[in-house]
Image (cartoon, rainbow, N blue to C red):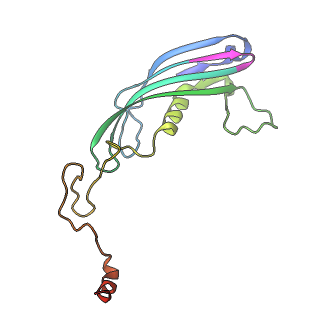
Amino acid sequence: MFLECKQLFDIPGEKKEFDYSLDLSDVELFSSKPFQSPVSVRGIAENRAQIVSLKLDCSFVMNLACDRCLADLERSFEEHFSHILVRELSSDEDDGGDYIVVEGGTLDLDELILSDILLSLPTKFLCREDCKGLCPSCGKNLNFDSCECQKKQVDPRLAKLSELLK
């Protein structure tokens, strides 16, 4: 969806509300396509005292695999984003990522929302906080069973040194 911002910049007090669904089913993330259903987007762009602010509320569900045990999991997210829109930055302003420059008077909301969502995601997805993961030797899921593998494995390069301690 494209947001026409020309009136927003020109008319103080102008506001535009929007509510739509964003299809991200083609987005590949973590070697899968986790967005099985559309992202629900609600927002408002408003000119207050010559400053155009954009507020977004996004809700979505992601289907992923646990990073420790590879179990399938489904997580719901509610994210809130806000941005300040400007036509251009003056040469002496240091942007620092605080402003979104709207060139040509049109803002691609889909691209902005996708980058906001990707930056807000956690770095690790777990099926539960105390997930034990998989046994590195036999691959058994340690959340359901314990395995009979040797718990303390000696590095084969250092095995001769352990003989000296006997």
First to last magenta residue range: 44-51
Using the rendered view, name the quadrant where residue 92 is placed. top right
Residue under the point 21% across and 56% down: 140
Give the overall secondary structure of the magenta segment: strand
Using the rendered view, name the quadrant where residue 91 is placed. top right
Decide if residue 13 is on the left or right side of residue 32: right
Q: Residue furthest front?
A: 166
Q: Nearer the viewer, residue 88 or 120?
A: 120
Residue 12, horizontal then vertical, whole percent: 73, 12
User: Is residue 122 part of the magenta span, yes or no?
Assistant: no
Decide if residue 141 is on the left or right side of residue 120: left
Residue 156, horizontal then vertical, whole percent: 30, 79
Q: Residue furthest right?
A: 92
Decide if residue 44 is on the left or right side of residue 146: right
Decide if residue 97 is on the left or right side of residue 44: right
Above/below status of 94 relative to 22? below
Q: Nearer the viewer, residue 102 or 130?
A: 130
Residue under the point 53% across and 34% down: 116
- Quarter placement of the C terminus: bottom left
Using the rendered view, name the quadrant where residue 100 is placed. top right
Residue under the point 34% across and 81% down: 157
User: Is residue 47 part of the magenta span, yes or no?
Assistant: yes
Residue 89, horizontal then vertical, whole percent: 76, 32
Residue 90, horizontal then vertical, whole percent: 80, 33
- Looking at the rendered structure, the number of numbered marks drawn on it comes to 0
